[in-house]
Image (cartoon, rainbow, N blue to C red):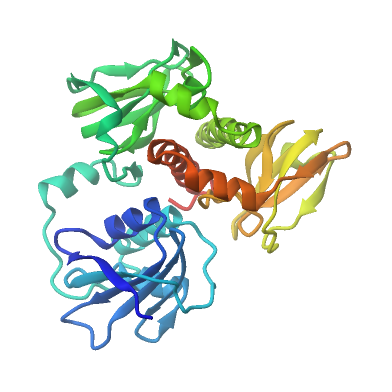
Amino acid sequence: MEGTQVLNGDLKFLTLAEVLQLLNSSGASGTLRLNSPYAPEAGLVYFSKGNIINAICAEQQGVDAVYGLFGWMEGEFGFTADEPQAKKVINQGVMELVLDGLRMLDDKEIPRLGPAPGLSQKAQVESEYGEIPIIKRPVANYGYVVDEDEIEDGHTIVQEGKHGSWVCVILEGYADVLREAGNEQVRIVRLGPGALVGNISSLLSRSSLRTATVVSAGGTVLGVLDLQRLHGEFSVLSFDMRQLAVSLDYRLREVTSRVMENRLGKMDPQAFIKNRKIMFEQGTEEEGIYRITEGHASIVRNTLKSTVPLAILNRGDFIGQFPFANIGHETGSAAVWASEDCKVQQLDLVSLTREYEDCSSMVRGIVEHVAQCISVTTKMVAGAI
């Protein structure tokens, strides 16, 4: 039985990067077909539950094919929802592929098909900081917005070190995330429409410590989310699911700290694996997910240049295959080094996935947003962007 085409459009209106992120955030399974007037054959990208598993572009397959398609500046796309008939050969997350593809396109490592368009006003805003990545998502779930607030350019929305209990979604405009580094502030990422300002901890307690400063860039319209409603939706989650969400929040703080250490020249990879033994080698096909019940573990990525520390995990944190989105810390992308006293408990991946699929779209969106932020920040600390 053939699938149904559920999405189509023009690459001049939605870029490939935007289409890939849209399909990722919606958890789509199926085949994305791209046609260019400058290519004799169509390009194909296969999705399974929002993740890219394979691709074809001319003579290329897999990751190289995905990167090649970023050079298609003109053409049409269509997405057919079905079970993709393709072998999984790609383990990278969608955001990792998007960031690599855009960087390679800027560095002219990918040939462009068709005339190179001039920068639109939107593109000029998004390219203003060059290598500083932009995180944005489809703006949805307006039913959760209880108030809107227009923020002037340069106004501080969130102050690092302060406490807060609200969560907002960016409806229009952009905002920069900054961290304190001595006497200066360092830009980490730029948030765009659909991105969230706040953290999961705010949804599980009355107040949480803000770990970064967020400043409006060029004017921003925020949608204040219904915190009471979100409190209720998070409170009915199972203990394992809530613990997983909290651990994601902590993981983002950890990998952001590695970015700062790298910027300040204070990165010490050996300290991360000292008095630890390897639990999972990088590249291991481990599909399970485990919670640390005793001891500690370090997540470390081996690159062509060096060994890159990503996060130190403690009791209650998880290791292994995150079931809902690729964050770049899975065993296929990083190694796990554990302390001598480290013990883990395997979680029921099937039950977690089923519970997640039954969550409200807003809960899923918040979790996926944090996962996306971890993926992007991991690429930064690994020196890939």
In the rendered image, is residue 301 in sight? no
Residue 294: percent from the left, percent from the top?
Answer: 82, 33
Instruction: Give the residue drawn at x 40%, y 28%.
Output: 186
Q: Is residue 374 above or below residue 304?
A: above
Q: How many marks?
A: 0
Residue 341: percent from the left, percent from the top?
Answer: 88, 36
On-image quarter of the N terminus: bottom left
Instruction: Give the residue drawn at x 70%, y 59%.
Output: 286
The residue closer to the viewer here, 303 or 246, is 246
Residue 206: percent from the left, percent from the top?
Answer: 49, 12
Image check: 144 left or right of 50? left
Which image quarter: residue 197? top left
Residue ranking furthest to the right? 340
Image check: 280 left or right of 164? right
Instruction: Give the residue drawn at x 27%, y 31%.
Output: 143
Q: Is residue 228 above or below residue 136?
A: above
Instruction: Give the residue drawn at x 34%, y 54%.
Output: 21
Image check: 369 left or right of 193? right
Which image quarter: residue 169? top left
